[in-house]
Amino acid sequence: MRQFAISDIHGCNISFNALLDQIGLTTADELYLLGDYIDRGPDSKGVLDTVIRLQSTGYKVRCLMGNHDEAILKARTDRRFYLDWLTGWGGEETLDSFKAFQWDDIAQEYWQFFQSLELFAEIDGFILVHAGLNFKLSNPFSNKTDLMYMRDWYKDVNYHWLGDRCIVHGHTPVTIEQCETLLQNLDTHQVLDIDTGCFAGTRLLGKGYLTAFDMTNRELFFQKNLDDVSGYWAGR
Ligand SMILES: [Mn+2]
């Protein structure tokens, strides 16, 4: 049994499936997805279908909530935010993937998926979260928004609170070289960012990869983006 973490798939379903093939995921393994399944990439619906199919065919998949997964729930009820979400968040690509003209065109099982997402997970030796922990709070788990949105929090890590646990997260894209360096320093710094900017495709140097972290063997797997993300970038 191995335990894997993957984050920030952002509608890149071909890359996601290629990465699952690369790691050879089996039903004996555990897969933790750290959020941001949707937006920007071309096939958000496909990503959700992949996750739901894995869960319904005996794979152990536990899913956390990213800011984009919270945002679609907000866009559904907040008309003003909806307009920002469409372009600023890459939500238009998500609606396209569902061929949705109104919210009801997105089936109930997907809304249930978003509503069921957890904010963090703790497994032996690792804390998993979408964005990070706010160590300025006496309980770094207590603020829901921080867990999904925090950036630049490494300088505030409270190692007394953390003990010997390591934090694995996404949300802030890094290059695969930066990701590898974080893994090399994992024993001392106890943080690992596995968002290697899959949605960027070839647009950002060193990014445009989807990453899996094998927590059992402390090994990284990089999958170069195979999805057509040109639609999103054409809209920038
Ligand atoms: Mn995010």
Image (cartoon, rainbow, N blue to C red):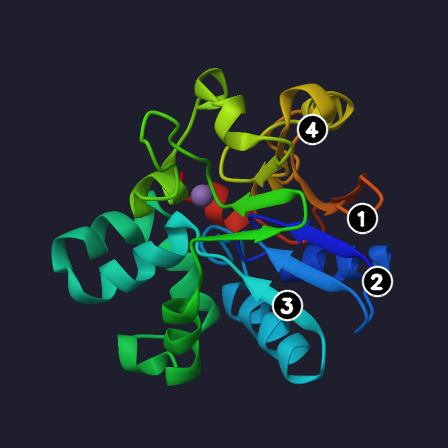
Q: Earlier in the sequence, mark 3 or mark 2?
A: 2
- The answer to whether the residue labelled 2 contacts the one labelled 1, judged by CB atoms less than 8 Å apart, is yes
Q: Looking at the picture, does residue 87 appear above or below residue 29?
A: above
Placement of the N terminus among the 4 image quadrants: bottom right
Q: Earlier in the sequence, mark 4 or mark 3?
A: 3
Q: Residue at x 45, y 54 (%)?
A: 39
Q: Looking at the picture, does residue 37 appear above or below residue 192?
A: below
Q: Amino acid at mark 1?
A: Thr
Real-space Cα separation, disc 4 to disc 3, in angstroms: 23 Å
Q: Earlier in the sequence, mark 2 or mark 1?
A: 2
| Label 4, residues with CA under 10 Å away: few <14, some 14-19, many ≥20 | some
The residue wearing badge 3 is: 61
Q: Amino acid at mark 2?
A: Met
The residue wearing badge 1 is: 216
Q: Looking at the picture, does residue 20 appear above or below residue 7?
A: below
Q: Amino acid at mark 4?
A: Cys
Q: Residue at x 48, y 68 (%)?
A: 97
The answer to whether residue 99 of the structure is visible from this angle is no
The residue wearing badge 2 is: 1
Real-space Cα separation, disc 2 to disc 1, in angstroms: 8 Å
Placement of the C terminus among the 4 image quadrants: top left
In the picture, measured across the screen, residue 223 lies left or right of residue 100, that is right
In the picture, measured across the screen, residue 115 lies left or right of residue 41, that is left
Real-space Cα separation, disc 3 to disc 1, in angstroms: 16 Å
Dot label at residue 116: none
- Element carrying mark 1: loop
Q: Amino acid at mark 3?
A: Val
Real-space Cα separation, disc 4 to disc 1, in angstroms: 17 Å
The residue wearing badge 4 is: 179
